[in-house]
Image (cartoon, rainbow, N blue to C red):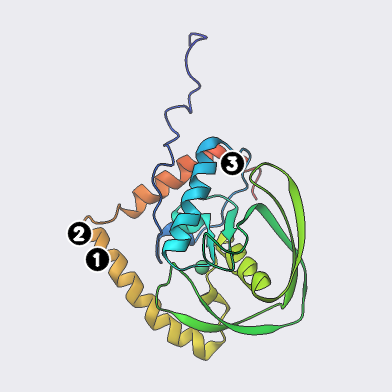
Amino acid sequence: MPSDSPPPTADASPPIGRLELVEYPHPALARPARALAQIDDELCDAVEQMFEIMYAANGIGLAATQVALPYRLFVVNVEGRRDAGEELVFVNPVLSRPRGVAVQEEGCLSLPGLRMDVRRPERVCVEAWSLDGAPFRMDLDGLLARVVQHEYDHLEGRLFTDRLPDAAALEARRMLDSFREVFHGRQSRGELPTTAAMLERLAHLEAARCVPATGSA
Ligand code: NI
């Protein structure tokens, strides 16, 4: 191969482009996101889009997996408005020191219309990197602790419906079934890409910015 050839992965990395909220059961929501190895301009633009999408949907938190980006990244603003509160970006977050128990109703932009009581630790610590690569640590309680844990679950491929007690899980199951029917209907009408195409894009986006998977982990 001549030395001036582009690296073999250059054409395999699709640009992030315009992002959209994805709903259950999009495959991006079901698989663990991968740690980011680099933050580039395109990713910063993606974070900007994520805040816009979150505000437009009246959300207070949004994980990258909810816009079909397979990255360990989420954004939060508990005020839910551009002109209020603080815009927080968590890159490669790690949670620790869960304490206490709290039950509070949650919803999710990827499960529109579904709201249920969810039990979680009341307080938790989070360590993460900001978008400019600075590490930070926060000791959280209240709404911020809840939102951060909800968004962190997204990075693990989990939804709040995975945390419900049996009776509530049964009720949620019916809603999830109808979400699945709508999703597959949209796919069969060509309004959404095929699941194979979605998975292919996720793999390309991972290859472009993530730490390569090692060993059998
Ligand atoms: Ni959610």
Q: Residue at x 33, y 76 (%)?
A: 178
Q: Position of residue 34 (x, y in %)?
A: 59, 49
Q: Which mark is residue 96?
A: none
Q: How many C-alpha atoms fall within 10 Å of the one at disc 1: few (<14), some, or many (≥20)?
A: few
> What residue is at 53 percent from the left and 49 percent from the top?
47
Label 1 and label 2: CA atoms lie apart by 6 Å
Name the residue at 53% across, 42% down.
Answer: 43
Residue closer to the observer: 196 or 186: 186
Mark 2 within 8 Å of ligand 1, using the beta carbon = no
Instruction: Give x and y (percent) for residue 181.
Output: 29, 71
Q: Which residue is mark 1?
A: 185
Q: Which residue is mark 2?
A: 189
Dot 3 corresponds to which residue?
A: 210
Alpha carbon distance from label 1 to label 3: 32 Å
Mark 1 residue's CB less than 8 Å from ligand 1? no
Label 3 near label 1: C-beta < 8 Å?
no
